[in-house]
Structures are given as C-alpha cells and as structure tokens.
Amino acid sequence: MPAAARLSFEKPIYELEERITKLEAAQKSPEEADEIRRLRRECVDLKKQVFGSLEPWQTVEVSRHPDRPMTSDYLNLVFDDYVELHGDKSFGDDRAILTGFAKLGEQKVMVIGHQKGKTLKERQACHFGCAHPEGYRKAMLRMKNAAKYGLPVVCFIDTPGAYPGIGAEERGQALVIAYSMFEMSRLATPIVCVVIGEGGSGGALGIGVGDRVAIMEHAYYSVISPEGCAGILWKSHTHKEKAAKALKLTSRDLHRLGVVDDVIEEPLGGAHRDHNQTAARLKMYLQKSFRELKSLSTEQLLAARYEKFRKMGIFTEGATA
C-alpha cells in the first residue's frame, strides 16, 4: 500500500506486517515458521490495541481513508441487479448522490447514497461527496417511487456536508434539505440509514431520517466537521483535534447519546483493510433490520419514526426544566 494511504498511527502495524512478509518470503526453518506465527499474533494484538483506543480525530482520519469502501463499492458487494436512476426532473443529475433499484438477497430495495469518487476526475465530478439541491431532489423522487411500489429504502451517508457554493444556495440548498427530512419523516415504507464514512452536517441529515439509523464503527456523525467547528470556536483549524473531542462524534458517543440505534463492527484494522468482510456485516445488518421492520404496520412505522427523532435533545430540555 502506498505511503500516502497510511495513517500516522498505523505505522507500527505496517512495519510489523512488512517484517512478516519478508520472513515469509525467506522462510527456510521451523524456527522461522514459529517466529512468523508469533509475529502474526503480535500484529493482531497491536491492531486491537490501536483501533480499540482511537482518539476522536483519529476516527475522523479513518472515516476519510482513501481506501475506505464507498457507496459504489457496497453496490457491487452487498446488492445484486443494481439499476441506476438519474436526474431530478428539474435541473440535472448530481453525481454526488447515487440512486437506483437493487436486490438485497431476495428483497427488492431502493438504494440512495453519497458518492465521493475514487480518482481525482471522479471526485471533481462528485464534488467530493458534497451534494447540490438537485441531488437531494433526486433522492426524494426515488424515495417516493419506493413508497409507491412498496420497496424499502437504504440510505448510505458519506459526506463532509452539502455543497456550500453560490449556485447551490441560489437553488435553495437549505430548503431542499429541510424538505427532504420532512418527506422522509412521513414516507410510508421502511427506511434504514447507515453512516459508512463521514456524516457531516445537514448534508448527512438530508438523507438521514430513518426507522433505523446505524453507523460503521470507525465512521463519524456530527453537526459540523471538526475543522469547521475549530474555525468557528477557536478561529483556526489547528484546533481540529480539540473540536473533534468536544463534538462527541464517534460511534460510541453517538450510540450512548441515542443519536444512532446500532454500531456495525468493522473488520480488525478498519473497513479499508477488508472490503468484503465489511460488506458482509453490512448486508447482515440490513437484512436483519428489514425483517424486524416488516412486521410493523405503516401507522406503527411512522409513529415510531416520529417518536425516535422527537426524543432527541430530551437531556437539554430536562436540564432546563
């Protein structure tokens, strides 16, 4: 793996793995085989130690890892027969949000997700995962189609935030996000949302209202990016680590505060190390969630979804009272 894709705190792990690789290539004696087995156990323990005690800012770094699986990867690994649907019937097609029909096992679903892109050309076309208003309008159209045909909706969240440009603001960025949240709150079909990487600000919330909201173990979900928070509170992005800690944006914090329902465990060393195993765990979670939601009537589904989001912030209201 190129050095550019290695995070600073992963350095001891890669050094140990390189040592193991060299020994495996030159293995000639039983003693060397024993040494390789010992080093492999040591490497597993090191990964558990490093990734089991990540600081909030380190979690943000993992969530942004260039090799981390994106929506397009999960479309290939989790679903079958994906058919992409384009455009918002109003302005154009926003590549920062992918939408389309797919099959999850035997279940037909509608998949909606942010897409950052892998190459520089793709990232520029996708605006690095920052959607414009037409992206959220496209998502809303697909959700309404899903409700019409009785299909569950899967939303993958992976964005640093909605696109902040002048054109996006002129086309009603804030209004479209608010309207998208309103429409999702009353959509008469099961919705499962998963934060697979970055969950930044209103850009994430725009497709984040669901019956189940889960987060990958090393993803983050926050009202603002750590750099944005540091710029506002401390007038410099250099305080991003302090901001990340204050925002309580890790999966453990979010689950404890009731912002997310479930945390999906990642393979040892993070999702960027094993796409297939990560996809298998995500698929199991989606199938389990839809089996549970299938037993609810539409009235029960909408009432539970409403209550789920209404009770957020109860701690502040209680303290004020």
Image: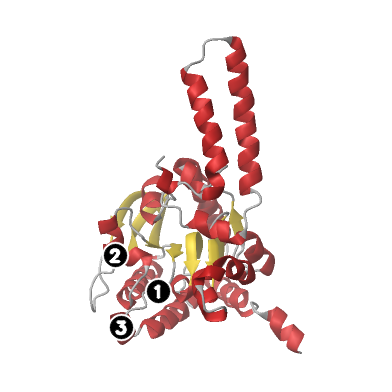
Q: Nearer the viewer, mark 2 or mark 1?
A: 1
Crowd tier of the residue under label 3, counting other residues whose Cα lies within 10 Å: few below 14, some 14–19, many 20 or above:
few
Q: Is residue 211 left or right of residue 74?
A: right
- Left of 34 or right of it: where is 87? left
Spot occupied by residue 14 in the image (x, y as percentages of width and height): 52, 38
Q: Is residue 127 above or below residue 320?
A: above
The residue that mark 3 highlights is 166
- Occupied quadrant, residue 152: bottom left
Tell me which amino acid carries mark 1: Ala
15 or 161, which is in the foreground?
A: 15
Q: Nearer the viewer, residue 4 or 143?
A: 4
Q: Which residue is mark 2?
A: 95
Q: Amino acid at mark 3?
A: Ile
Please name the colour scheme applied to the rendered image.
Answer: secondary structure
Residue beneath disc 1: 162
How many residues crowd around disc 1 within 10 Å: few (fewer than 14), some, or many (20 or more)? Answer: many
The residue lying at 43 percent from left, 71 percent from top is 161
Quadrant occupied by the C terminus: bottom right
Q: Nearer the viewer, mark 3 or mark 2?
A: 3
Number of the label disc, if any, that sits on residue 50: none
